[in-house]
Image (cartoon, helix red, strand yellow):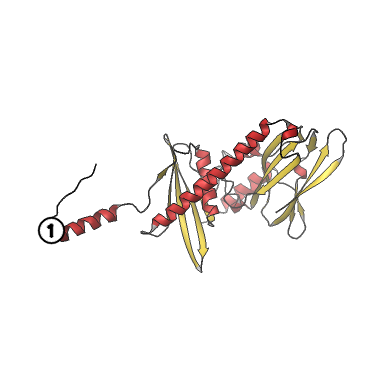
Amino acid sequence: MSRSFVCARPAACVVWLLVLASCTPPIRQFDLKDQPLSCEQANRYAHDTLKAMGYAIRTFTPAPAGGEGVVKGTLDERGSSKSATVVITCGSAGPTLDASEDGKLLGQIEFHRAFYLTFTGVVSQQQALAKMAKEQAALPPAQRKQQGFEVLITPAPGQAARVDFAADFAAAGVLPVRVVVHNRSERGYRLDPDEIVMARADGERVHPLSVTAVLERVQQGSKEAADGSPPIADLAALPQQLETKRFSATTIPRQGSAEGYLFYPLAPYKRARVLVTEVDSDESEGVVVEF
């Protein structure tokens, strides 16, 4: 339905139209109902989207169920720096995102479009990978495209692990590393998580920290925060999160998988080495993952 009107005082109407335009928000909150995502997925994809756009993530506070979270990032471009903020709201009707470029009143549509397109691309890619993995898992072992023993090791520096842990590990001098193991063979393997060794740039080999050592570093980092900011971690929730999500598998049966996190002192690492032993033959083999 459309509506028209006649203005007897054109000048006044111009002013009125300008007022209406100035009241229009420069960027709309876009709804994710067409993409049925969980709150955890919305948090993770919002972080990954801003990172994919080239922004360095400075702040990441995941939204809890029924609450709000925020992702902030900065981008250095052509000698200047700009920042952006994404507010994540996990309401009863599903998650919504509100993305904007900081300090910019006009011209937000371009940023909003770029964020939305990148976001949908990130979601589509993850959904396609999940679908492919599900289809492969449903096939008989001999028909699967990927065979053998596969180890994926992915450092999660900065704010990347905030979806899974109530801690700012970077501020505590801790590097979370995600470990995923797929055994697509017909043989069983065993390994020792404490022997998954990271090699620093200077060649020194580093073993993972214990849960106790991680907690001590986080607690110390929280005590040393001298700017009056809130504690960098919810220390009541963190111990259980560390125990639950820590990579602790010691045996990977045939056609089995395992995943979780290990934690190392924060440093630049070049590679990781995993020692795996075939159960039947007791023969060991080193798997090297380059970064």
Residue 252 in the image: x percent, y percent?
A: 75, 34
For the residue pair 233 and 99, the one nearer the viewer reads as: 99
Residue projecting furthest to the bottom? 79
Residue 18 in the image: x percent, y percent?
A: 24, 58
For the residue pair 4 and 289, the one nearer the viewer reads as: 4
Residue projecting furthest to the front? 143
Q: Local crowd at mark 1 within 10 Å, few (<14), some, or many (≥20)?
A: few
Horizontal side, residue 66 vs residue 235: left or right: left
Judged from the image, the secondary structure of the residue bearing numbered disc 1 is: loop
Residue 17 in the image: x percent, y percent?
A: 23, 55
Horizontal side, residue 230 vs residue 143: left or right: left
Q: Is residue 62 above or below residue 10?
A: above
Name the residue located 51 percent from the left edge and 69 percent from the top edge: 79
Confirm whether residue 190 shows in the render: yes
Confirm whether residue 164 shows in the render: no
Q: Three-letter amino acid code at disc 1?
A: Arg
The quarter of the image holding the C terminus is bottom right
For the residue pair 95 and 264, the one nearer the viewer reads as: 95
Horizontal side, residue 172 vs residue 282: left or right: left
Residue 177 in the image: x percent, y percent?
A: 67, 47
Name the residue located 66 percent from the left edge and 40 percent from the top edge: 260
Check disc 1 and report the residue beneath it.
9
Name the residue located 57 percent from the left edge and 38 percent from the top edge: 237
The number of numbered badges drawn on the structure is 1
Q: Is residue 135 above or below residue 87?
A: above
Residue 95 lies in quadrant: top left
Name the residue located 70 percent from the left edge and 36 percent from the top edge: 258
The quarter of the image holding the N terminus is top left
